[in-house]
């Protein structure tokens, strides 16, 4: 499912002293099956942007086309939109409320009015996808670890079989293991089901390893939209807007100023290792 | 005198079933020794559930040890008569800034702690000014805290602790919910307090780039301290850290990978400069 955003503007508190333009003239195309990182500092508009994509916020002007159809046209089914564009909020574990994990994951598909067998089949599949096996079925969501809770919450969205999965800072507050588990799980999901994934984050290191494309937001506008290497080449500008490139980018830059061959495409430890060994003719 | 001295610390709690029956005994802290001299900066690493927050809560007597002893500035944390003194000695900053701010105006929020200690009014406002300046938030004194960024809010929370003039500050993942700028602001503030005012800092964190700033790093797993030493000593054990699913800084990891690929690099490289210097030396020698 493709998403096309055309000249999107969003102003909140219009006509009050708190009036603020949160999004300025955003135009983007997200093709089917892409794994996209949306990066920006706090208040850059990234969460506001993704909340438009499943119709939680309505643009002040501009348009959003999902599979070529405007979601703002009369009679467009928001219910349908929300079942095909799944949004996992920040700290989704606060939204777990059922007595056991399985019932909680069933909540979404149940509200879609599906037959019981289908609901349970979907819940099982979604729990498998996030790495929670049957032994977690009857466990209270509140007894899970932070990372497990978050995976249970993501399963609740996956059970609705969205075509686009949007996650707003899915790794915030998790430890390195919990973070890697979630990101590896998303990468597997993307590879196996071809689902479109939009990952909102402020960690460059995390995102660089996984995504095909990075959209950098600043002050409500799109600052960069490129492959990770293309975005990190602007590391000095990124710092000015409160972001930082991965540490390896700085290492390669430092080496370049010391007369080593330029390796500006490097965004991960693995790539840096290869570039350095190459420069030393050890490969 | 040591500001923190803990010996054979054990903390157990009992887990209950839904029916209210005791189900299992959990040892969240299991035989930990912790010592800090005044002015030390100690970082505690470990994944969630490793017992690091439980240990931290002992340092200002929110929890008291099931076994073993813990002295904070010479006071036994199990002695209820010392409770207030201990809490004034060791202040705590938590993960979520929104849960720690109660005032409607920044300076009132910072005044809350010392006011409750009975600090006279004139002295109180002097302290508020001094601590807000120390965290670089003096210009925001008349602002409403809820309009501030996460990093700014967290600095206000720190100012609220600083105004109580503790000898020791315990920070439990103070940057986990912040963006890179917020993180840098908070860590700079903490470093400043440690370096200029010699406040003892115990920092619990998941960010390795913060841990490398400490004098000493303690790594916890299953309630035990499984590794400790200077940041260089700890991060030179890349394989050990990985086995315990902990990160090392990217530069340390890169150096380690290069070493495994046959380059003659020293262990425990922590900064970009160190790595570049070592690589230059190799390249020059070829």
Image (cartoon, coloured by chain):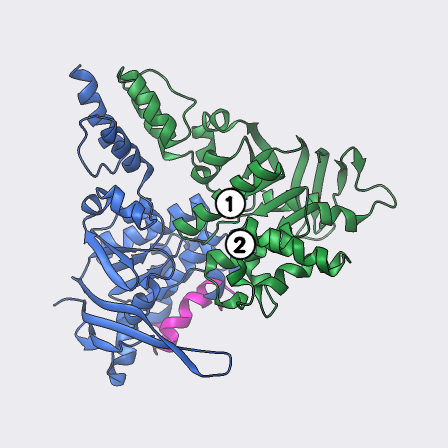
Count all numbered tags in the image, as a single digit. 2
Residue displayed at 52% across by 34% down: A211
The one of B5 and A153 positioned closer to us in this rendering: A153
Quarter location, residue A276 = top left
Looking at the rendering, which quadrant does residue A282 occupy?
Answer: top left
**Residue A267 in the image: above or below residue A134:** above
Q: Which residues are magenta?
A: B102-122
Q: Is residue B130 above or below residue B273?
A: below
Chain of the residue displaying label 1? A
Give residue B60's position: percent from left, percent from top.
30, 72
Q: Which mark is residue A151?
A: 2
Nearest to the observer: residue B276 or residue A282: A282
Dot placed on the residue nearer the N-terminal end, 2 or 1: 2
Secondary element under disc 2, as helix, strand or loop, is helix
Q: Position of residue A126 (x, y in %)?
A: 60, 52
Inter-mark Cα distance, 2 to 1: 9 Å
B127 or A70: nearer the eye?
A70
Give the side of residue B227 with respect to residue B87, left or right. left
Subunit of mark 2? A
Q: Secondary structure at mark 1?
A: helix
* Chain colored blue: B
The quarter holding residue A108 reads bottom right
* Up-down relation of residue A184 to residue A105 (above or below): above
Chain A tint as drawn: green
């Amino acid at each position: 499912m493709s998403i096309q955003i055309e000249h999107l503007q969003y102003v909140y508190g219009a006509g009050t002293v708190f009036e603020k333009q949160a999004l300025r003239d955003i135009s983007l195309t997200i093709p089917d099956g892409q794994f996209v990182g949306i990066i920006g500092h706090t208040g850059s508009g990234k969460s506001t942007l993704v909340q438009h994509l499943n119709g939680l916020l309505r643009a002040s002007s501009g348009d959003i086309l999902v599979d070529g159809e405007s979601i703002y046209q009369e009679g467009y089914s928001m219910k349908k939109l929300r079942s095909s564009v799944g949004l996992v909020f920040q700290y989704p574990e606060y939204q777990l409320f059922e007595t056991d994990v399985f019932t909680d994951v069933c909540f979404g598909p149940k509200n879609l009015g599906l037959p019981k067998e289908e609901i349970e089949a979907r819940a099982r599949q979604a729990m498998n996808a996030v790495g929670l096996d049957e032994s977690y079925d009857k466990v209270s969501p509140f007894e899970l670890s932070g990372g497990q809770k978050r995976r249970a919450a993501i399963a609740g969205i996956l059970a609705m079989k969205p075509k686009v999965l949007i996650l707003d800072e899915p790794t915030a507050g998790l430890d390195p293991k919990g973070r890697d588990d979630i990101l590896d799980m998303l990468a597997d999901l993307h590879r196996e089901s071809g689902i479109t994934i939009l990952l909102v984050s402020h960690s460059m290191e995390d995102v660089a390893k996984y995504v095909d494309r990075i959209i950098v937001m600043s002050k409500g506008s799109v600052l960069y939209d490129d492959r990770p290497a293309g975005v990190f080449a602007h590391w000095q500008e990124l710092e000015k807007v409160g972001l930082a490139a991965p540490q390896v980018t700085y290492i390669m830059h430092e080496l370049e100023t010391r007369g080593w061959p330029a390796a500006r495409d490097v965004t991960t430890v693995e790539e840096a290792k290869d570039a350095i060994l190459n420069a030393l003719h050890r490969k | 005198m040591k500001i923190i001295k803990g010996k054979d610390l054990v903390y157990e709690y009992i887990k209950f079933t839904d029916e209210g029956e005791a189900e299992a005994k959990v040892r969240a802290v299991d035989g930990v020794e912790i010592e800090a001299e005044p002015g030390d900066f100690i970082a505690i690493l470990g994944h969630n559930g490793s017992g690091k927050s439980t240990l931290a809560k002992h340092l200002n007597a929110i929890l008291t040890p099931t076994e073993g002893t813990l002295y904070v500035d010479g006071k036994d944390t199990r002695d209820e008569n010392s409770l207030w003194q201990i809490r004034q000695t060791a202040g705590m900053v938590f993960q979520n800034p929104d849960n720690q701010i109660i005032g409607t105006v920044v300076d009132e929020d910072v005044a809350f702690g010392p006011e409750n200690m009975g600090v006279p009014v004139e002295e109180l406002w002097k302290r508020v000014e001094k601590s807000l300046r120390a965290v670089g938030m003096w210009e925001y004194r008349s602002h409403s805290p809820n309009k501030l960024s996460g990093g700014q809010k967290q600095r206000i929370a720190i100012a609220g602790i600083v105004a109580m003039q503790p000898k020791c500050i315990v920070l439990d993942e103070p940057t986990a919910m912040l963006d890179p700028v917020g993180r840098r602001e908070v860590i700079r503030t903490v470093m400043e307090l440690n370096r200029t005012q010699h406040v003892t800092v115990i920092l619990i964190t998941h960010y390795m780039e913060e841990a490398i700033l400490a004098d000493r790093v303690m790594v916890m797993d299953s309630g035990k301290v499984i590794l400790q030493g200077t940041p260089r000593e700890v991060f030179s054990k890349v394989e050990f850290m990985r086995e315990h699913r902990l990160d090392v800084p990217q530069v340390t990891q890169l150096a380690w990978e290069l070493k495994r690929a046959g380059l003659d690099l020293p262990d425990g490289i922590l900064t970009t400069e160190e790595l570049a210097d070592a690589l230059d030396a190799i390249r020059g020698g070829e």
